[in-house]
Image (cartoon, rainbow, N blue to C red):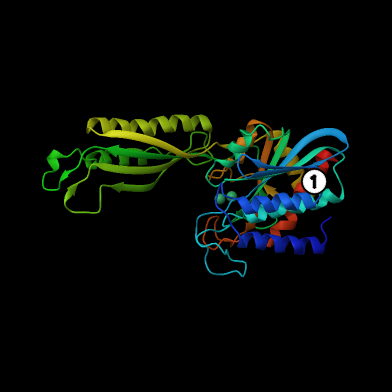
Amino acid sequence: MLTNADIAELIALRRDLHRQPELSGREIRTAARMAALMRDLGADRVLTGIGGTGVVAGFRGAAPGPQVMFRAELDALPIPEAAGPDHRSTTEGVAHLCGHDGHMTGLVGLGRLLSRQRPVRGTVWLLFQPAEENGAGAAAMLADPALPAFDYGFAIHNFPGLAQGRALLAPGPVNCASVGMRTRLTGATAHASEPEKARTPTLALTEILPALLALPQGSQSDADFRLVTLTHLSMGEPAFGITPGTADIWVTLRTQRDDAMTALRADAEAIVTDAATRHGLGAAFDWQDAFAASVNHPEATALLAGAAEGTGIAVQTEGLPMRASEDFGRFGACAKTAMILLGAGIDQPPLHAENYDFPDALIAPSVRLFHRLARDLNG
Ligand SMILES: [Zn+2]
Ligand SMILES: [Zn+2]
């Protein structure tokens, strides 16, 4: 069991991680720190540099049994943190505003308990993944041949807006798929007094924008849900003497399912290509930040629900999937996976808000939940 000293030390660790955030794919110090903590705890294997900066630590039982993975994220966000806590970020413009500092701390707490009493069978793996926020990290770890094989994978995400002591968990979609579509329209400039000599994207934009914005349908609980968010738009230069020759359109596409995303991508691309062709413009596409849908496996979900019940967490099933994406879903391709959304409190600011701070009160329940699951599966 966690002692009061454990909890105090874990809170101090969480706040120290909060002070030292690192951006996606550049989590060098954070990853080294997690690896050192795992070695200090006497993990049987500590793998580093997996898919970039990823770290995986294994605590092995004497008997054969399941390979069970628990996942946390190493990265912070490129957002300046609001003035506030003593443990405020010391890196300008970068902050842990998604609670990944708390998720890492929960895994360290689990490691402490496993170091005192090894699992009976199989292996419990603590996985610290890079680059969750841009959707690149889980895929990079999975592409690394050094990554061990897992039978089960579990993750917690803290969830502001839901009371502490409660959680969202259900089989099926838990996070939507999303992708960023960057489009550049290219024509030719001319003097502002002679727009007829330019090939300018103005009229194409007046057709493309309403057509893209007409694509959304349904709510995220519908299988055919589609959301299109215009996130950035620019045309030409900020000047009065030039008829512009280029425009950039950035939109984020979301769907509940991966196959629906394939169709939405095709529809969005066709809208842009058709308008560009009619107006004599070139259209180039660049797809970024692709997240697969996260889908909870029924068996993994039932195991997680049992552990939640056993540790006094009240689970509700309505309200899923979240519109926001999570790259934990990638691990579902190689293991039975489930993610639970742990209530961070009704009055908390939303994730990615400049004043979000993972509540320390969630550390102990996170550790107890994962430890219960590890005991259930690995003894
Ligand atoms: Zn986030
Ligand atoms: Zn997050």
Give whichever of 34, 332 is nearer the camera.
34
**Left or right of 117, for residue 237:** left
141 or 122, nearer to the observer? 141
Quarter occupied by the C terminus = top right
The answer to whether any part of residue 312 appears in the image is no
On screen, residue 301 versus residue 356, left or right, reads right
Looking at the picture, tell me which residue is in the foreground, 306 or 365. 365
User: Residue 145 at what x, y percent from top left?
Assistant: 66, 31
| Residue plotted at (75% across, 38% down) | 68
Q: Is residue 2 above or below residue 178?
A: below
Q: Secondary structure at mark 1?
A: loop
Relative vertical location of residue 213 with respect to residue 91 in this rendering, above or below: above
Q: Give residue 210's quadrant in the image.
A: top left
Q: Where's residue 297, x and y in %?
A: 67, 34
Image quarter of residue 70: top right
- Front position in the image: 165 or 139: 139
Q: Position of residue 337 (x, y in %)?
A: 68, 37
Name the residue rendered at 85%, 42% in the picture. Answer: 119
Callout 1 amino acid: Ala
Residue reaching furthest to the left: 193
69 displayed left or right of 290: right
Count of picture labels: 1
- To which residue does mark 1 refer? 43
Q: Quadrant of the N terminus?
A: bottom right
Question: In this rendering, does residue 239 appear at all?
Answer: yes
Judge from the rendering whether residue 37 lies leftward or rightward of residue 98; answer left or right.
Answer: right
